[in-house]
Amino acid sequence: MLRDNLRGIYYIALKDMRIYYLKPPSVSWGIIFPLSWIFAFYLRNPRSFEELVPGLIAMTILFSTTAAEAVVINFELRLGTLERLLLAPISLPSVLLGKVLGGAFFGLLMSITVTLISTLALGLHPSVFKLIVIIIPSLLVFSSLGALLCVMVREVFEAQTLLNLPRFLMIFLCGVVYPIEAMPGALRFVAHLMPLTYTVDGLRRCFSPGSDAVVYLDALVLVAFFLLFILPAIRLFYSKFE
Amino acid sequence: METVIRVSDLTKFYGEVLAVDHISFEVRRGEIFGFLGPNGAGKTTTIRMLTGLSRPTEGSATVLGYDVCTEVTQAKRHVGVVPENSNLYDEFTVLDNLLFMAQLYGVPRARRREKAEELLKIFGLSDRKDSPFRTLSRGMKRALTIAAALIHEPEILFLDEPTVGLDVVAARSLRNLIGQLRRRGITIFLTTHYLEEADLLCDRVAILVRGKILSVDSPGALKEAAEEESIIEFTFSGEIPGLIEELSRVKGDVRVVPVDFGKVRVYGGSPGDILEAVFRFVRGKGIEVLSVNSIKPSLEDAFIKITGLSPAIMAIEKGGR
């Protein structure tokens, strides 16, 4: 049974990569959009570009994992292809996890690309191990956030709209371009309720020497966010087939 | 003969709406079992419950001995499902769709391509194997959807309205294919609202109306039961309002069912009394009797007798068309 489920998760993720993610709209949304934002902020307030690299990677993770999440669930539900997956001998949570993993795979590819280009171009030397510790749970968090918002609604456009709200709030509040410490107390509090804060914080620590403990703490908080998003997403996904 | 599907008091409510109402039946290994009924009768809902896409509200069902509520994943390994809509991936080629299904069902890597090629040959799609699914004709899409459901060599195949939307030639070729599958030993559970299709294909038929099973038997036995009473078909030169009231005065249990414009079938009663009543009725009304035929009961007649519904209701496609 476990083997069937793992196999199903893997092949669904691969299938989603081929059909939805490795396509120009997803690639442009996943890479070009974060790059344009970072350049816009850089041009408005030119300072060391190196400081913006963790924010750039964080935005790439956020936008690439959620690039097609609304499509991969609600669109397939509408076309009936999702039922095709559910007819296979795999559990319903495995189908959803396959969808989440598809987004995470694509996010991994995009974030590796952005990280490699930016570190090589700027001559940075981040800790690869710490990058993995932060990037992997972050990919799962944002992909499962996309899945959760997607199963909360019926239509593809509703999911896209709903996804934009947390995405743009997180860009402004989570330290991507403005340091959280410089924000008013209330906004700082809100920022700490958002997962991207921990991604950005963890990534910053990957690029500067310092205590590893905070990086692991960030990773733990991200794992908690993943559970917070994926468990209700599975519950809601079940309810669509009762 | 071994029972492969056993359904007992299966019931499904969608909110307040009762879609399937305490149905019970059994399907035997190797047979083609038809679920016949108009749209909205609960046929698709029953398939969805038997294949784990929907949870029953009440009752129980087993497929190959596996409980559909608690062991459906095990059952899925041995069943193939062809939904009403051909729901493969438009973006994938014909071959890639089959290979993806083989991956999902755990067909060993070494067997996947061989099995896919074999099915493409059987279904006459070998020369289209590199074409994207979206470029196929409706009939080819249907054939590929059935092929995809067979990739893991299931023991039972569920076919939901297999020929809906197909032209006459494609539907006929698909029916031949279904016959071939049965000869290969696959048990087939199909739903249809085409009476002729059920008659041609099925070993046994369950007639389902408004969520309830009214009868389960072979098409032959259902027709024989309908033969106990006479069926006379009249064709008139125009509309015949008032005929039903006129014939209600004839002795015996007589029912008049409109078949088409100016055409009715009269079930039951004595043929002599009915002919006399009809000719007396049309006399002086300016309506001619164009033809009178004594009808050998078809499955349609059996259906009318059992359900009391007009056959026209069976012609209504989903969405009221």
Image (spheres, helix red, strand yellow):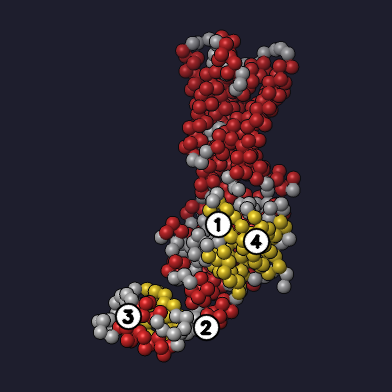
Q: Name which of mark 1 and mark 2 comes first in the sequence.
A: 1
Kind of residue at disc 2: Glu
**Residue on which disc 2 sits:** B227
Q: Name which of mark 3 and mark 4 comes first in the sequence.
A: 4
**Residue on which disc 4 sits:** B9
Question: In the rendered image of this protein, does residue B111 appear above or below residue B35?
Answer: above
Of marks 2 and 4, the one in the foreground: 4
Residue B12 falls in which quadrant of the image? bottom right
In the picture, which quadrant includes the N terminus of chain B?
Answer: bottom right
Kind of residue at disc 3: Phe
Q: Which residue is drawn at 57% across and 11% down?
A: A185
Residue B2 image position (x, y, % from top left): 73, 69
Which mark is drawn over residue B173? none
Residue B42 falls in which quadrant of the image? bottom right
Residue B232 image position (x, y, % from top left): 42, 83
Looking at the image, do the residues carrying marks 3 and 4 touch, with CB atoms under 8 Å apart?
Answer: no
Within 10 Å of disc 3 (Cα), the crowding (few <14, some 14-19, many 20+) is some
Q: Residue at x 41, y 84 (%)?
A: B250
* Chain letter of the residue beneath label 4 in the structure image: B
Tell me the CA gap for discs 2 and 3.
Answer: 24 Å
Is disc 1 placed on a helix, strand or loop?
strand
Q: Name which of mark 1 and mark 4 comes first in the sequence.
A: 4
Q: Name which of mark 2 and mark 3 comes first in the sequence.
A: 2
Which mark is drawn over residue B19? 1
Tell me the CA gap for discs 1 and 3.
Answer: 39 Å
Is disc 3 placed on a helix, strand or loop?
strand
Q: Which residue is drawn at 61% across and 21% down?
A: A193
